[in-house]
Amino acid sequence: MKGFVVCAACGARIKANRTHCLRCHAPLLAPSPAGEAPARSTSRPPVAAIAGAAVGLLVVGLLWLLWPATEPSGSPAGSATTAATRDAPAAARTADAPPAAPGTVLDSRRAASAAFTSGDFQKARAGFEQALQKNPDDPEALNGLGLTLERAGDIQGAVARFERATALAGDKWAYHFNLAHALGRLPDWERAIAEYRQAAQLFPTDYATQFNLALALQKKGDDREAIQEFEKAIALAPGEPTFHLALGNSLAKTGRLTDAQRAFRQYLELEPEAPDAAKVKAHIDILGAAAAQPISPPPAATAKPALP
């Protein structure tokens, strides 16, 4: 995406005007030329680099933001496995067939993930399906196929693969994160929130997970709880202007008009040249006028005439 660079250390997509990654604080590389895949760290295999792929985030009412999440090495392992599972896309091995050699499965996954990274999703899908033919219980291949299906618009198919991946490896943050994102596209906010919470437990310092959780709560209509989660995301990445913008929306909806003005002003301080800056300034003025209005007491009840 124009104006963004991909962090070679953790895979997060960050605005090009920043010098360090907001997630892992590594120095950022210059934007890749048009048509070229972004440079990635050579210390990690391609399949790890797409553990959590590009994820779309919606800030209600004012702005769209694209934010990917790639699971960094050493992310925490954790708690319970999700119970919901569906059948794997590939046929199971017959009882007398020997399991595929680990190297051949890994080769298929690496080729598929390289195709995914380069944008060849048809080749990526074929590669992940080939890996699953060799090992139907490969959670990395299931996750990769889920990402590819989601890109192709098959959200239900993607959900099924992510569910299977989380059932096989419930301690992987990326699988829960990707499942939550796909559920949000259905939309199934109740289940998406549950999966984002699970992802946040596994990777509590990831600001993108925390922000997605807050957005899911906001979309569900639970702005009071969303405010708490937005504040956690801001504590993790205070320099991200969109977080303050989204917080301001929920604060305004819950009647905290002065706090909403403060959040919107913080957004403008961090992003003074934002395309929607004029609209945000106008909204701040509207909120200020509303906050200045005295609260009228409820009208006194009039006595009913006595019955004859």
Image (cartoon, rainbow, N blue to C red):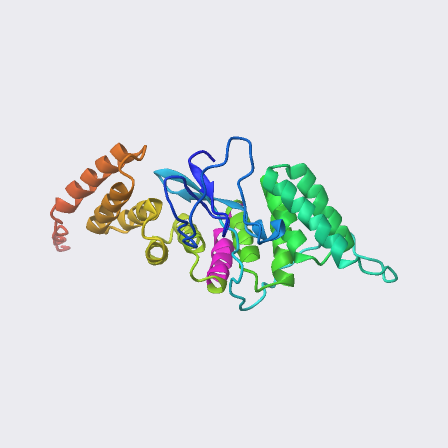
Q: Is residue 179 above or below residue 117?
A: below
Q: Is residue 274 left or right of residue 217?
A: left
- Pick the front one: 17 or 150: 17
Is 197 magenta? The answer is: yes
Question: In the rendered image, which quarter contains the C terminus?
Answer: bottom left
Q: Is residue 247 above or below residue 268?
A: below
Q: Which residues are magenta?
A: 186-200
Q: Main secondary structure of the magenta part?
A: helix
Please give the name of the residue rendered at 88% of the width and 62% of the height, measured from the top-left corner: 96
Residue 301 appears in the rendering:
yes
Q: Is residue 283 left or right of residue 31?
A: left
Residue 223 horizontal/vertical position (percent): 34, 53
Is 220 magenta? The answer is: no
Residue 214 horizontal/vertical position (percent): 39, 53
Residue 217 horizontal/vertical position (percent): 41, 53
Residue 103 horizontal/vertical position (percent): 75, 56
Please give the name of the residue rendered at 72% of the width and 47% of the height, measured from the top-left corner: 129
Q: Total of numbered circles in the picture?
A: 0
In the current view of this chain or complex, which residue is farthest to the top? Answer: 34
Please give the name of the residue rendered at 53% of the width and 42% of the height, measured from the top-left corner: 39
Q: Is residue 229 left or right of residue 79?
A: left
Q: Is residue 84 above or below residue 161?
A: below
In the current view of this chain or complex, which residue is farthest to the bottom? Answer: 79
In the current view of this chain or complex, which residue is farthest to the right? Answer: 96
Residue 89 appears in the rendering:
no
